[in-house]
Amino acid sequence: MDVINDFKVFRVEHLDGYVPSFGRKDLYRICLITGKSIIHYNDQQIRIAGNYLFFGNINTPYAWEIESGEQLGYSCLFTYDYLLGADHGQSLKDFSPFNAANIPLYALTSENQVSSATFIFDRLMEINSIDYPHRRDMIRSLINLLMHEALLIRPLATYRTHRIEPGRSSQQLSTRFLNLLDSQFPVESKRLGISMTTVADFAGKLGIHPNYLNRAVKKDTGKTVLRLINERIITEAKVLLEQTDWSISEISFCLGFEYHSYFDNVFRKVTGCSPKAYREGREPVQHSP
């Protein structure tokens, strides 16, 4: 690991019988994969064979199921804070392949693409092994370069998981809402919480009537706007309960709940247990990758 314990890069090889599950951690991950695998993320799965770049973010549960022992490549892991500076951290939330609305896999279909990605990973390993005062800046730039390699492979306009067909206004609006909802996460400070928690908040931001937003989202997803808001907020609440030592009251406040009792009720409705019971029932968090 880096001296500040928030970056790691290594080569992947000979993984016979190994089934890694990365789930929701405090680490972002970029992998260069060569071999046959099944990538599970959210409620979707993609079977791959060949060379791929994989981008795992901290908000989307995912797992990697290996179908062949000849699994080769590289992996690097890093925290959000590691990329802060030079606007790289902000790019994780905005246009980068780490956006939760994007498909996390990028096929490398030419020798040039594979060579470029391999060179960047080799350079990451080399720079991480030397004693250089600006090592962190160089690593940041190389990680950012990997993100841009993905942008070259699949332009921004084709990233979205939801494909929008002409005339599908409800799907367009639903996608805009879901992207806006996701843009509030992850919560990084208990003093700077989320600002949009109601149907009216999102409708106002999108410039439409709340009832129209709810009809469009319900048509496209089968769920109401309020249900999607609550589910996403409680997903973040679980992470904060697992990954931080913040009090339940602090978590409640930063997630937009004026009263702790309301947070408790919503958490119970979504998960079936209280925030306190959820935290006490979790295994101790291992912070090393």
Image: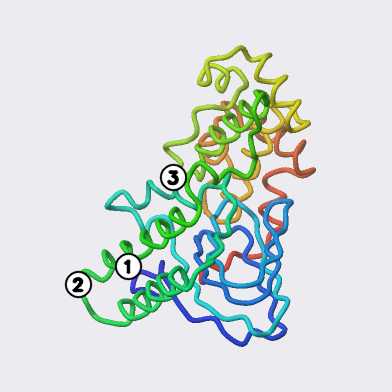
Local secondary structure at mark 2: loop
Mark pair 3, 2: CA separation: 29 Å
Q: Is residue 88 above or below residue 208?
A: below
Query: What x and y, as percent, mark residue 32?
Result: 52, 71
In this view, the mark in front (1 or 2): 1
Q: Is residue 255 left or right of residue 1?
A: right
What kind of residue is marked 1? Ile
Residue 23 horizontal side relative to residue 250, left or right: right
Seen in the picture, residue 282 relative to 77 is either above or below; the reply is above
What residue would you read off at disc 1? 139
Frontmost of labels 1 and 3 is: 3
Residue depicted at 61% across the width and 52% down the height: 60
- Which is nearer the eye, 273 or 64? 64
- Few, some or many C-alpha atoms within 10 Å of disc 3 (few <14, some 14-19, many ≥20)? some
Q: Which mark is first along the chain, 2 or 3?
A: 3
In the rendering, at what x and y percent does residue 200 appear? 59, 17
Q: Nearer the viewer, residue 159 or 3?
A: 159
Q: Amino acid at mark 3?
A: Phe
Disc marking residue 235: none
The answer to which image quadrant residue 16 occupies is bottom right
Residue highlighted by disc 3: 95
Picture residue at 39% right of the left edge, 48% below the top? 91
Residue drawn where x is 50% and y is 69% of the image? 110
Q: Tag on residue 133?
A: 2
Query: Residues under labels 1 and 2: Cα distance?
Result: 12 Å
At mark 1, the secondary structure is: helix
Mark 1 or 3 closer to N-term?
3
Numbered disc 3: secondary structure: loop
- Neighbor class of circle 1 (other Cα within 10 Å; few <14, some 14-19, many 20+) is many
